[in-house]
Amino acid sequence: MQALVLATGEPIEFIYWAFAMACPVFVSAPVSLVLVRQAEANQRLNLALLVAQRELMTQADRDHLTGVLSRAAFYRHAEAYDGDAPASVLLADIDHFKAINDGHGHALGDAALRLVASTLQAALRPDDLLGRVGGEEFAILLRGMPMPLALAIAERARGAIAGLCMRAADGSPVALSISVGVASYAAGMSLDVALAQADQAMYSAKRNGRNRVMISD
């Protein structure tokens, strides 16, 4: 077979020409296939890492005991409220919680916290915020909720918790109740100020006999 000739006039032996033609098929193609598979594996790994990162962020936002928002997460989400309609904030504190802990042990106290948290959550809408902001204290943001409706929801939650009855290790009943303070909140307002007003109303509820809802002045 006649050899090919370079532009310089030098001949190319057939074996070298054949090798040059075969390289893309027998070398480049497998390398390309490996690179494509590696890219797909990297894509799957990146997706798994993103999912894991989101799960970790979600876990970091949650109170480890009750599953509701942590204090930091509640503040972050509540401060970002930008709704046109006024909102309301509630501050709820479990009555006589120290007596529950001291008299029946921390295990029952933890169970009380989880039960109150789940009962509060059940009384809210999906887009409302509930966070544990203190030992036995919960904060709630009712998005776009005017004060009369906020009071009705607070009363519903208070009544639901007052209707609960836990049992101590010896079988004796342990009553639960909360005192709730309610204050107005709107986009652009200071969340600290609104929660301070709700806090004052909540302590007013405690001074007036506990297991009640009070509105801020």
Image (cartoon, rainbow, N blue to C red):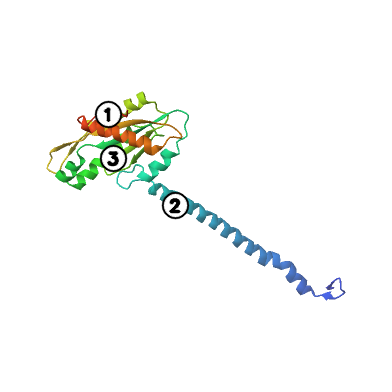
Which residue does the image show at 35% across and 44% down from the upper left? 71
Residue 117: percent from left, percent from top: 29, 39
- Residue at the top extreme, as displayed: 148
Residue 179 to residue 62: above or below: above
Residue type (three-letter) at the residue carrying disc 1: Val
Q: Nearer the viewer, residue 200 or 136?
A: 200
The first of marks 3 and 1 along the sequence is 3
Residue 159 to residue 69: above or below: above
The first of marks 3 and 2 along the sequence is 2
Which residue does the image show at 50% across and 56% down from the upper left? 45
Horizontal side of 32 relative to 13 (left or right) equals: left
- Residue that carries the numbered disc 2 in the rendered image: 52
Q: Is residue 70 visible?
A: no
Q: Specify the quadrant of the image occupied by residue 91.
A: top left
Task: Locate the N terminus and report the quarter of the image it occupies.
Answer: bottom right
Q: Nearer the viewer, residue 209 or 51?
A: 209
Q: Nearer the viewer, residue 28 or 127?
A: 127
Which residue does the image show at 64% across and 61% down from the upper left? 32
- Residue that carries the numbered disc 3 in the rendered image: 137
Task: Locate the C terminus and report the quarter of the image it occupies.
Answer: top left
Q: Secondary structure at mark 3?
A: strand
- Residue that carries the numbered disc 1 in the rendered image: 213
Residue type (three-letter) at the residue carrying disc 2: Ala
Residue 126: percent from left, percent from top: 40, 34
Q: Residues within 10 Å of mark 2 (few under 14, many from 20)?
A: few
Residue 20 to residue 43: above or below: below
Q: Residues within 10 Å of mark 1 (few under 14, many from 20)?
A: many
Residue type (three-letter) at the residue carrying disc 3: Glu
The first of marks 2 and 1 along the sequence is 2
Mark-to-mark CA distance, 3 and 2: 30 Å
Horizontal side of 56 relative to 31 (left or right) equals: left
